[in-house]
Image (spheres, grey):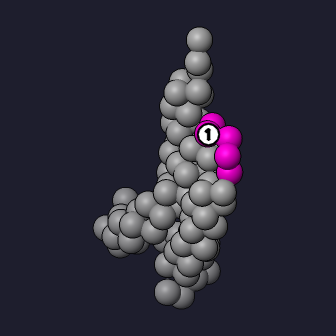
């Protein structure tokens, strides 16, 4: 039996689940500036995944990298959710 697909599915589920609160916290503490960290880490993870020969590790890095890139879009939406009052605004941050 080959469990690679199941493992990739489970880890993808966990990564996506972890990114939801991560985006909320990143927007709260650093605002839209955190998109640069998501971009850098995402591109780095995708680049490394291209060089990894082990399929399972490469796939997990790819999922992680593209989740980072997707988080950039989610940051913009989170900003709007904060503006709409659905999430708290950081009172210590001016922008």
Q: Residue at x 56, y 33 (%)?
A: 8
Note whether 20 is above or below 94 in the view shown: above
Q: Residue at x 59, y 11 (%)?
A: 1
How far across and how far down the image is residue 74, in percent?
A: 41, 62
Query: In front: 81, or 19?
Result: 19
Within 10 angstroms of label 1, few (less than 14), some, or many (20 or more) residues?
A: few
Q: Residue at x 61, y 64 (%)?
A: 47
Note whether 3 is above or below 81 in the view shown: above
Q: Is residue 87 visible?
A: no
The overriding secondary structure of the stretch rendered in magenta is loop
Tell me the SS state at disc 1: helix
| Residue occupied by mark 1 | 55
How far across and how far down the image is residue 30, in percent?
A: 59, 76
Q: Residue at x 60, y 73 (%)?
A: 40
Task: Report the magenta residues as a range.
Answer: 52-56
Where residue 41 sits, quadrant-wise, is: bottom right
């Amino acid at each position: 039996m080959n469990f690679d697909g199941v493992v990739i599915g489970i880890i993808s589920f966990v990564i996506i689940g972890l990114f939801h609160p991560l985006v909320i916290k990143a927007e709260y503490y650093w605002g839209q500036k955190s998109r640069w960290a998501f971009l850098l880490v995402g591109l780095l993870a995708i680049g490394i995944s291209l060089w990894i020969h082990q399929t399972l590790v490469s796939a997990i890095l790819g999922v992680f990298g593209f989740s980072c890139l997707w988080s950039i879009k989610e940051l913009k939406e989170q900003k709007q959710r904060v503006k709409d009052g659905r999430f708290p605004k950081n009172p210590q941050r001016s922008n």
